[in-house]
Image (spheres, helix red, strand yellow):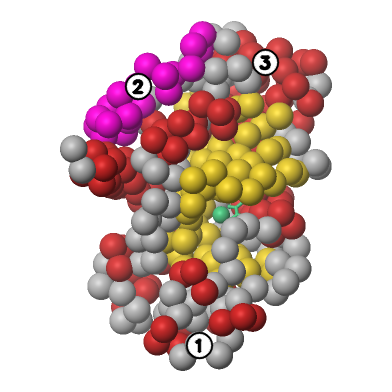
Amino acid sequence: MIHTASTAAPLDFVLDGLMRRYRERVPDVDCVVKAMVKAGLVDSVGGIENDHIAFRTMGVPNLGIASFEKIFLHYGYEKRDFLRFDGKKLDAYWYAPPVAKYPRIFISELCVDELSDNVQRIIHSYTDEVTSDPADSLDLDNGPAVDEFLHSPLWRTPTWEDYQVLAEESEYASWVIYNRYYLNHFTVSVHNLPAQYDTVAKFNEFLKSHGIHLNNAGGEVKISGDELLLQSSTVAEMVDATFPLAAGGETTQQIAGSYVEFAERRVLPQFATLPPAEIRREHRRDGFETANADKIFESTFRDQTGRR
Ligand code: OOG
Ligand code: NI
């Protein structure tokens, strides 16, 4: 069998399924898409260059990066750099796609064993329901099966009390315990857009003129040390979430869902003299930047969502 025939189709199915749920859950996505269509930048969401997508995981046995990455490694993604976030107790890797038309993938993991005993106990009371690595029993060539896996809860819905205890110590923990493998964000690539929109600074002004709320942690534009990777993101939208209560019954609360990111990758100094028409992905800054990412994580944190 031809290699691309066996891997490309399930990957397309999985990416489409992720984007469909994400668009339904995050109204900002269609707000951004509509604004871009109205400005003549794209015909539809499919015309947007997606720089990367991101997932969050719980770093416990059978789950975390070691489990989740199996899906995308199977589709030909290549594991690249390790990133560490001491303050947030997170590890992450990014993955390069098999073909440039696919987005990069950013997968992070909460280092659960670095948290307080009480929070560890609460997290394990949920994640211990998973007794073997679920990626190992998944038929990764079956796109619909993987799509269903990504959108089916691996553990019971947390109680509202547990959710709040987690949020006090780690807002990443509370996000994952409820949202699980929902797509955390997709990323509009701006550097190939027409000149009035081709930087994150210019694109942010366009977004704000359409009423989009931007994450301002560390400033609205996050700039890498080499000044070649610039990023911004929306403040996550709130979703209605129904939680069981410890004493019985349930409560519906508004909690942070997902957000949208924007990225500008500048041309590397060694390609600065290339004619613009010849510039492709490999001529631009690749990878991620820990200091930028550290602030982008906060798009789902209450300091930011409280500003909407
Ligand atoms: C990921 C935050 C980091 C980036 O592009 O640096 C990130 C997250 O919020 O899970 O997306
Ligand atoms: Ni991102």
Task: Name the residue at 49% across, 11% down.
Answer: 132
Say whether disc 1 or disc 2 marks the residue closer to the N-terminus.
Answer: 2
> At label 1, which amino acid type do we have?
Leu
The residue tagged with tag 3: helix, strand or loop? helix
Expressed as whole percent of the image width and height from the top left, the position of residue 158 reads 55, 20
Q: Residue 297 in the image: x percent, y percent?
A: 65, 49
Mark 3 / mark 2, whichever is N-terminal: 3
How many numbered discs sit on the rendered protein?
Answer: 3
Quarter occupied by residue 253: top right
**Tag 3: residue type?**
Ile
Residue 250 higher or lower than 6, as above or below: above
Q: Earlier in the sequence, mark 1 or mark 3?
A: 3
Q: Which residues are magenta?
A: 129-149
Q: Position of residue 105 (x, y in %)?
A: 49, 48
Residue 300 at x, y = what percent? Answer: 61, 47
**Residue furthest front in the image:** 1
**How far, Cα to Cα, is label 3 from label 2?**
27 Å
Which numbered circle lies on residue 229?
A: none
The residue that label 3 is drawn on is: 122
Left or right of 36? Residue 68 is right
- Location of residue 129 with respect to 168 vertically, above or below: above
Q: Is residue 55 magenta?
A: no
Tell me if residue 21 can be seen: no
Which residue is under mark 2? 138
Within 10 Å of the Cα at label 1, are there few (<14), some (14-19), or many (20+) other Cα atoms?
few
- In front of the other: 73 or 2: 2
The residue closer to the viewer here, 78 or 188, is: 78
Q: Which residue is mark 1?
A: 274
SS assignment at label 2: loop
Which is in the foreground here, disc 1 or disc 2? 1
Closer to the camera: disc 3 or disc 2?
2
Instruction: Tell me which residue sits at (68%, 58%) in the image.
Output: 289
